[in-house]
Image (spheres, rainbow, N blue to C red):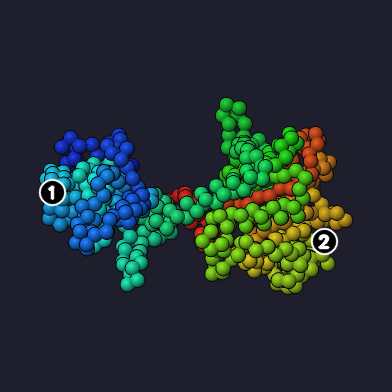
């Protein structure tokens, strides 16, 4: 609370006090011209339409008409991002959520009086204003609002790190951001969004992804639901939870790590197709693709299995890609590759994928010890990493370390070890393998799915096996979930996908922090 004001900030505070002394509120409760408001983009479109409707005229007549402008009065509201004062006239560029438009003010009968212009000259970059007037075209062809009245809406005290813009010979604009350090951008996302419009576009894309996913599932008979974030027992994934305490109940609770067990309870209750898009919380490491809280999509559908879920997931990805990446017909660039999300995905068993990229056929090593020896012999993992891992964890490690990075084009890997998939149905004729797939794109895991286990006795046995193991991320047995299963659960397929990673893919960002508005960071010293 002991902010030390800079010289620039002190100058702006002096202007703020000057306004208050003059009886002007620098932070008014409401706008004056709200009913007249148009966005910058709407104003530009109106001018284009108005120009097109002008009658045939001589060049001089047309120039005069453009300068006189459109007769209808409107108002523009937004943040000042550029300013140019020339004697008794001045221009400011005002930016809103749709773009920018220039505002012109001068002392004169068709604009503002001298006292108002003195205040106009005192405006700073970052101030929010509203300006009322008519739209016209300057001699240089710039769409502009000629102000006949204006008001300050919010005085900016701290200057934003405004980017430098340079017009290129081809007419495009190159931006040199004054605020490009990632750590600073993530800590002050509000400033990042204010000065970097391309960052705002990332989050517009993210919103379109979520909206399109909802359209997809709603149109296919799925019901969107909400399940508890605070849970007495966590489950549905292999992860360490965050723990909190309910004071009134004097009870420890966990922030959910997955929606799975609650969504499948709903299948017992009679809903056949359910999905949820929401936050999960996992008390684990932070990396370019991991954040302690993240957004997840999960769906569960009665009478589906891993292969029909695979078909639906492929259909879903194609639908979302075409809707969100319409300009490229569902293709995106990520990590230097053009990735086609529309065409059918490659499908390969986990065994074949690991064999291709490591030379190890893990089915030839039926126990932990023999597989560990083979991995060490091939120098695929350090000895300290191999030590203590179950056979399933070793197989998963081979996938993560040696296969995943090679799966650039969309690929489904299926048939996984049972001991790392405690909620999946076993493969017929092979009890050590379960009906599970993971989807990979751009060298990273994107989604995960199962033929869900619906045998309560088998499920109870697997919970007990996990309890006897040494995996600190193993989920505890959930007796209420078992009770639900004992009432009868239809055969079903389930699916989970990280929205954050999907947004990384669609916006060509290699860090999850770029697609989270407020990523978790270490405490600032």
Q: In this view, does 332 lie to the left or right of 412?
A: left
Residue 495 spot, x, y in % from top left: 68, 50
The residue lying at 62 percent from left, 48 percent from top is 216
Q: In this view, does 299 lie to the left or right of 521?
A: right
Residue in the foreground of this view, choosing between 413 and 373: 413
The residue lying at 47 percent from left, 49 percent from top is 518
Crowd band around label 1 with a 10 angstrom C-alpha radius: few (<14), some (14–19), many (20+): some
Q: Quadrant of residue 455?
A: top right
Residue 457 spot, x, y in % from top left: 84, 41
The residue lying at 66 percent from left, 50 percent from top is 496
- Please give the count of numbered marks on the rendered protein: 2
Report the mark closest to the observer, 1 or 2.
1
Which label sits on residue 380? Answer: none
Which label sits on residue 367? Answer: 2
Judging by the rendered image, the residue that carries numbered circle 1 is 107
Q: Work out how far the residue at label 1 is from the one at label 2, CA to CA, in angstroms.
A: 87 Å
The residue lying at 77 percent from left, 50 percent from top is 305
**Residue 158 appears in the picture as rendered:** no
SS state under label 2: loop
Residue 427 spot, x, y in % from top left: 82, 54
């Amino acid at each position: 609370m002991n902010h030390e004001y800079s010289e620039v900030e002190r100058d702006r505070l002096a202007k703020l006090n000057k306004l208050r002394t003059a009886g002007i509120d620098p932070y008014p409760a409401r706008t004056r011209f709200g009913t007249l408001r148009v966005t910058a983009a709407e104003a530009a479109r109106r001018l284009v339409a108005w120009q097109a409707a002008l009658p045939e005229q001589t060049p001089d007549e047309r120039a005069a008409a453009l300068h006189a402008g459109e007769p209808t009065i409107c108002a523009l509201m937004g943040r000042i991002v550029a300013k140019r004062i020339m004697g008794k006239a001045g221009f400011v560029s005002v930016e809103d959520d749709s773009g920018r438009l220039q505002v012109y003010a001068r002392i004169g009968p068709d604009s503002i009086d001298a006292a108002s212009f003195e205040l106009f000259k005192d405006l700073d970059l970052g101030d929010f204003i509203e300006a009322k007037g008519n739209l016209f075209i300057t001699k240089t062809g710039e769409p502009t609002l000629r102000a006949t009245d204006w008001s300050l809406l919010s005085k900016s005290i701290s200057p934003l790190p405004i980017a430098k813009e340079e017009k290129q010979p081809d007419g495009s604009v190159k931006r040199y951001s004054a605020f490009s350090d990632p750590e600073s951008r993530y800590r002050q996302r509000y400033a990042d969004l204010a000065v970097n419009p391309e960052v705002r576009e990332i989050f517009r894309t993210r919103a379109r992804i979520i909206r399109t996913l909802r359209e997809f599932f709603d149109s296919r008979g799925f019901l969107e639901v909400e399940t508890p974030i605070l849970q007495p027992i966590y489950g549905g994934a292999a992860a360490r939870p965050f723990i909190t305490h309910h004071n009134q109940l004097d009870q420890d609770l966990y922030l959910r790590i997955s929606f799975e067990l609650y969504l499948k309870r709903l299948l017992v209750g009679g809903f056949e197709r359910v999905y949820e898009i929401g936050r999960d919380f996992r008390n684990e490491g932070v990396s370019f693709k991991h954040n302690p809280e993240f957004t997840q999509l999960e769906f569960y559908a009665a009478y589906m299995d891993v292969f029909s879920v695979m078909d639906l997931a492929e259909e879903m990805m194609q639908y979302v890609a075409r809707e969100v990446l319409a300009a490229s017909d569902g293709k995106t660039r990520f990590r230097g590759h053009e990735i086609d999300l529309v065409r059918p995905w490659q499908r390969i068993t986990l065994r074949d994928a690991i064999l291709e990229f490591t030379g190890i056929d893990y089915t030839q090593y039926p126990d932990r010890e023999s597989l560990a020896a083979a991995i060490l012999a091939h120098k695929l993992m350090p000895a300290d990493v191999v030590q203590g891992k179950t056979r399933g964890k070793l197989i998963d490690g081979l996938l993560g370390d040696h296969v995943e990075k090679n799966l650039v084009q969309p690929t489904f890997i299926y048939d996984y070890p049972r001991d790392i998939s405690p909620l999946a149905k076993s493969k017929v004729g092979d009890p050590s393998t379960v009906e599970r797939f993971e989807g990979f794109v751009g060298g990273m895991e994107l989604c995960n799915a199962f033929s869900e286990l619906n045998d309560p006795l088998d499920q109870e046995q697997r919970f007990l096996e996990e309890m006897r193991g040494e995996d600190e991320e193993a989920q505890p047995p959930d007796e209420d979930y078992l009770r639900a299963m004992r009432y009868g659960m239809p055969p079903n397929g389930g699916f989970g996908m990280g929205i954050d990673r999907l947004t990384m893919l669609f916006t060509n960002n290699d860090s999850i922090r770029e697609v989270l508005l407020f990523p978790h960071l270490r405490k600032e010293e």
